[in-house]
Amino acid sequence: MVEWTDKERSTVSAIWEKIDIDVIGPEALARVLIVYPWTERYFGTFGDIFSATAVLGNAKVAAHGKVVLKALDSAVKNMDNIKATYADLSRLHYEKLSVDPDNFKLLADCITIAVACKLKSALNPQAQATWQKFLSVVVDAMSSQYF
Amino acid sequence: MSLNAKDKSVVKAIWAKVSPKSAEIGAEALARMLTVYPQTKTYFSHWSDLSPESPQVRAHGATIMAAVGDAVGKMDDLAGGLISLSELHAFKLRVDPANFRILAHNIILVLAMLFPADFTAEVHVSVDKFLQNLALALSERYR
């Protein structure tokens, strides 16, 4: 089981409170599609996502970014049980969506970069370490049903 | 994923903007790498202080970033331009090349923090490619 100190718990909550899901979600997903274009393979129904301009103006990308980031709320509220919380989502991503779990790390990195843009130096090195630890636990949970 | 003409001009443009803060960017990036990825501390066991405020860490971060800035001018032949640095990392420092990606992530994060308006997704992808190509050039002499 993952151990969290009180400081880590409050750091994750504090960061989460400062994040506007409707802004960070679309930004993070757009960055994933632009910086790692092979991820386009998972979004065949989204229309034009084949240039940075198209991605940044795409309403489906923005909407889906919000969905994805909203799902992080479950992890923030269930830090002691992240693996179980995401079991169904993990199975979905494996069995139905066929997503290569390496992509979860790419998304996690883009979320962190979007958060860093917003929080700037408020995301000090220790806060960054805690936030990345949190996201890596989520990534592990999302990969847990791949077998 | 080699650098095309657009990548090179994007990287040169963002570097012109950020280079006055090169030392600060490097110091922050190295400090964060050591804090967020503790396994990287294994390469610096000869330093007494590996905290983010450590003068040794911050000075070394500045050194690294100066070399990155230098590489911006060598984008047409990174492998050729970085031979001696590659030999240093391969034979003397023996840094596992996986760590170059970790440092790149932290450089990108610090650029995003310090220049949020300029570090658009388009700049992000070109810088990511540049750092990846830089890492490749640095690994050139490893085997």
Image: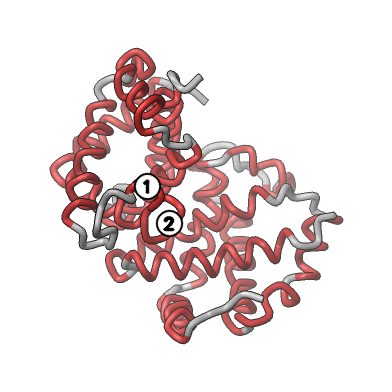
Of all chains, the one bearing label 1 is: B
Mark 2 — residue? A113
Of all chains, the one bearing label 2 is: A
A113 lies left or right of A135: left
Q: Residue at x 44, y 20 (%)?
A: B140
What's under tag 2, amino acid-wise?
Ile
Mark 1 — residue? B108
Residue A130, quarter of picture: bottom left
Residue B67, quarter of picture: top left
Residue B50, image x, y percentages: 29, 58
**Which element is circle 2 on?**
helix
Q: Residue B137 or B126: which is nearer the viewer?
A: B137
CB atoms of marks 1 and 2 within 8 Å = yes
**Which element is circle 1 on?**
helix
Kindly identify which numbered label has been placed on residue B62: none
Label 1: how many residues lie within 10 Å, few (<14), some (14-19) or many (20+)?
A: some
Q: Residue at x 70, y 66 (%)?
A: A141
Residue B136, image x, y percentages: 45, 26
Residue B60, quarter of picture: top left
Picture colour scheme = secondary structure
Residue A111, image x, y percentages: 50, 60
Residue A67, image x, y percentages: 64, 68
Please say if A138 is above or below B22: below
Quarter of the image that includes the C terminus of chain A: bottom right
B17 lies left or right of A89: left
What's under tag 1, amino acid-wise?
Ile
Label 2: how many residues lie within 10 Å, few (<14), some (14-19) or many (20+)?
A: many
